[in-house]
Structure formats: structure tokens, C-alpha cells
């Protein structure tokens, strides 16, 4: 077998192994998605989810992240939202809606009645097969999340959001840096190596 073919085959094997490892783990532990492990890693690193956290979970379906938050938060409020309907979970309120619509933002504000401690977003635009376009569309969603979070978070609030290492990555990073004092990026082990996905972690709003 030629060297390049051999390499491709071994890469495909590694990708499959990685996927299977987290898939099996999620089934064993009863998580609705492999994504749950990404949030577990993010929270292990940054420790932003506490029992009294008021948290907004955007792009929540099927509910892996919601399950993780529901296990930790007992006295805080959790609102999950997605365009797709999510099955119920203990101490989670759910809104089926498009985050980009104006009245969604009003519903969120009505629900919390106060500023939030944490916003997490795992939103991803529907894939088109064009990686560059997919990353631009997901990063547009992330841009909206950064803008919204900067208005609704408490001064020491935390934002965690998915984005892609695409052409417009630096634009999103600059926007985040204009709104928050500390901006970092983290790629959890549960996120596939070959995926351009990365997570933005922002803390402490800049006062204007
Ligand atoms: C990777 S999945 C989220 C996985 C989820 N965090 C979990 O742990 O199970 C991305 C989700 O973003 C949602 N989404 C994409 N665009 C959206 C929008 N404009 N408003 C609300 N949800 C959106 C999709 O419907 C999809 O369910």
C-alpha cells in the first residue's frame, strides 16, 4: 500500500476510534450527546457552573449540556433553547425558538428578570458541505451570542461559546476582546481533532 493511502487509512481509523470512544461513554453514562463531555471539560478548566448559577444554554438540543448543568445547578435558574424541541429535563426550562429572532431575546429577559451569571452556546448552523461557509455561518451565530451576552451578563459574568477556526475567527476574537476583559480559547479533548471547532471563554465585562 502506498504511504499516503496508508496514512489516510490510519487517520480515518483514529477519527472513528475517537468518535466511538465518546459515543460509548455517553451511552454508558446516560448523556444525550457526546457534547456533554466538552462542557464537563470546559467546566473542569474554568469552573463557571456552580449550584446557584443563573444560566442560559443556547443551541441546547438534544440536551447533553443541559444534563450537565442540571446535575450541578440546584438553586439557580436554567433556561435552554433551540429551534428543535428538546425532551424535558429536571430543573430545566425550555424554549423552542430561533435565537436570532428579536422576541426570543425578550423571552429570555422575561424569564431571568435579572442579569445572568453564565451564557453557554453550542449553536452550530446546519451544515451545507462547504466547510468555509459552514464556519462563517456558525461564527455569525457566535457573534450574535457575544453581543447579546455583553448586554445581559452580570459584570463578572461568563460566556462560553462554540466557534470555528475559519477566515473570520479573528473578527469574532476582536469583538469578544472589545466586550470582555479576559478572552481565551480552549479545545476540549472530546472535540474531534479534525474539526475546526473551538470554544471561546470570556469573563468580566469591560465597562464603557
Ligand atoms: C451541536 S448541537 C448542540 C448540542 C447540545 N449542546 C448538546 O449538548 O446536546 C447545535 C444546535 O444548535 C441549534 N441551533 C442552530 N442555530 C440555532 C438558532 N438560530 N437558534 C437556536 N438554536 C440553533 C441546532 O438546532 C442544534 O441543535
Image: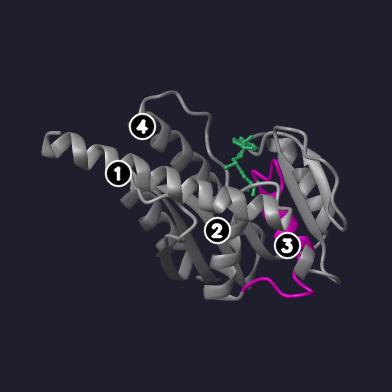
Front tag of 2 and 4 = 2
Horizontal and vertical percent for residue 93?
A: 84, 50
State which tag comes first along the sequence, 3 or 2.
2
Q: Residue at x 44, y 48 (%)?
A: 17
Q: Secondary structure at mark 1?
A: helix
Q: Residue at x 70, y 33 (%)?
A: 83
Task: Using the rendered view, name the quadrant where residue 139 is placed.
Answer: top left
Q: Is residue 199 shown left or right of residue 82?
A: left
Q: Secondary structure at mark 2?
A: helix
Q: Which residue is mark 1?
A: 11
Marks 1/3 in contact by CB < 8 Å: the verdict is: no
* Pick the front one: 17 or 85: 17
Front tag of 4 and 1 = 1
Q: Which residue is mark 2?
A: 38
Q: Is residue 196 visible?
A: no
How many residues crowd mark 2 within 10 Å: few (<14), some (14–19), many (20+)? many
Front tag of 3 and 2 = 2
Q: Is residue 17 shown left or right of residue 52?
A: left
CA distance for labels 3 and 2: 12 Å
Q: Secondary structure at mark 4?
A: helix
Q: Residue at x 75, y 49 (%)?
A: 80
- Image: magenta residue range: 48-70
Q: Secondary structure at mark 3?
A: helix
Marks 4/1 in contact by CB < 8 Å: the verdict is: no
Q: Is residue 197 visible?
A: yes
Horizontal and vertical percent for residue 13?
A: 36, 43
Task: Using the rendered view, name the quadrant where residue 183 is placed.
Answer: bottom left
Horizontal and vertical percent for residue 188?
A: 47, 61
How many residues crowd mark 4 within 10 Å: few (<14), some (14–19), many (20+)? some
Badge number at residue 131: 4
Amino acid at each position: 500500500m502506498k504511504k499516503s493511502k496508508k496514512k489516510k487509512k490510519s487517520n480515518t481509523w483514529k477519527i472513528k476510534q475517537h468518535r466511538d470512544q465518546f459515543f460509548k461513554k455517553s451511552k454508558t453514562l446516560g448523556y444525550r450527546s457526546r457534547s456533554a463531555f466538552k462542557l464537563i471539560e470546559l467546566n473542569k478548566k474554568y469552573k463557571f457552573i456552580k449550584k446557584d448559577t443563573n444560566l442560559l444554554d443556547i443551541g441546547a438540543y438534544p440536551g447533553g449540556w443541559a444534563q450537565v448543568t442540571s446535575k450541578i445547578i440546584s438553586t439557580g435558574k436554567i433556561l435552554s433553547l433551540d429551534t428543535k424541541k428538546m425532551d424535558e429535563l429536571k430543573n430545566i426550562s425550555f424554549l423552542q425558538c430561533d435565537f436570532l429572532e428579536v422576541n426570543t431575546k425578550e423571552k429570555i429577559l422575561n424569564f431571568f428578570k435579572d442579569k445572568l451569571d453564565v451564557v453557554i452556546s453550542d449553536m452550530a448552523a446546519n451544515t451545507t458541505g462547504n466547510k468555509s461557509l459552514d464556519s462563517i455561518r456558525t461564527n455569525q451565530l457566535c457573534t450574535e451570542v457575544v453581543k447579546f451576552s455583553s448586554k445581559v451578563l452580570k459584570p463578572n459574568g461568563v460566556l462560553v461559546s462554540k466557534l470555528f477556526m475559519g477566515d473570520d475567527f479573528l473578527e469574532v476574537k476582536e469583538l469578544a476582546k472589545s466586550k470582555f476583559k479576559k478572552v481565551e480559547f480552549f479545545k476540549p479533548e472530546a472535540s474531534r481533532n479534525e474539526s475546526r471547532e473551538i470554544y471561546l471563554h470570556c469573563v468580566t465585562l469591560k465597562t464603557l
